Image (cartoon, helix red, strand yellow):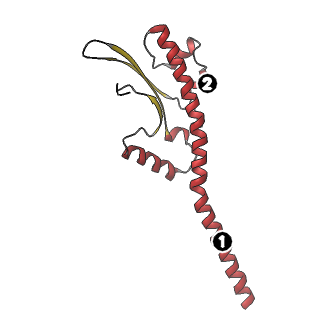
Amino acid sequence: MKISNNYILSFCIVALAVAAFVSVNRPLRFDRERKARETVVIERIRLIGQAEKGYLQKHGVYTADFRQLTAEKLLADSLQFIPYSNGQRFVLQATVDVSPTGHRRPLVECSAPYEAYLNGLDENHIKRLIDDAMAAGKFPGVSIGDTNGTQ
């Protein structure tokens, strides 16, 4: 009987050790995967930004339409989609800010929300990231540019 109790206790210790390892490793794995995905998303946003600069040089304004960027061969058609998102497109906004003196300044913003490119990862971690970004007054995801004129 004493031997079987030792086996049961040993099994419980191993199970607790595994549970502790998994609970510590899960956030680390999430952060590692998030950083890897963000690297890919940021590179794609950088390419969209380059295409927008080309469009600006040609037309004097930015565009919020991926079809215009692809039609002018400034951007490959596949680059409008957020990686890991099951086909969601980047959010692309363009406007022209007019100052009180009449100076016109074209503005563009390209973004990818956490929900899109972190698709398939731990929902609780994604929600925590979104809540933290919202509490800090930041966009919950990756974004470049600003169409509010506060660049």
| Residue 53 visible at all | yes
Task: Using the rendered view, name the quadrant where residue 43 is placed.
Answer: top right
Dot 2 falls on a residue whose secondary structure is helix
| Residue 46 screen position, x and y as percent | 55, 26
Q: CA distance from mark 2 to mark 1?
A: 46 Å
Identify residue type, mark 1. Ala
Camera sees residue 83: no
In the image, what residue occupies the spot 47% across and 47% down?
129
Q: Residue furthest bottom?
A: 1
Amino acid beneath label 2: Ser
- The mark found on residue 138 in the picture is none
Q: What SS does tag 1 mark?
A: helix
* In the image, residue 4 above or below residue 34: below
Q: Label 1 belongs to which residue?
A: 15
Q: Position of residue 106 (x, y in %)?
A: 39, 16
Looking at the image, which residue sits at the far right? 3
Residue sitting at 55 percent across and 32 percent down?
A: 42
Q: Residue furthest top?
A: 58
Which residue lies at the image location 52% right of the left edge and 22% below the top edge?
49
In the image, residue 70 lies at what x, y percent? Answer: 57, 16
66 vs 30, nearest the viewer? 30
From this view, report whether residue 11 is shown above or below residue 148: below
Which numbered disc flags the more N-terminal residue, 2 or 1?
A: 1
Look at the image and tell me in which quarter the N terminus lies: bottom right
Instruction: Please state if 26 lies on the left or on the right of 58 as rendered.
Output: right
Which residue is label 2 attached to? 78
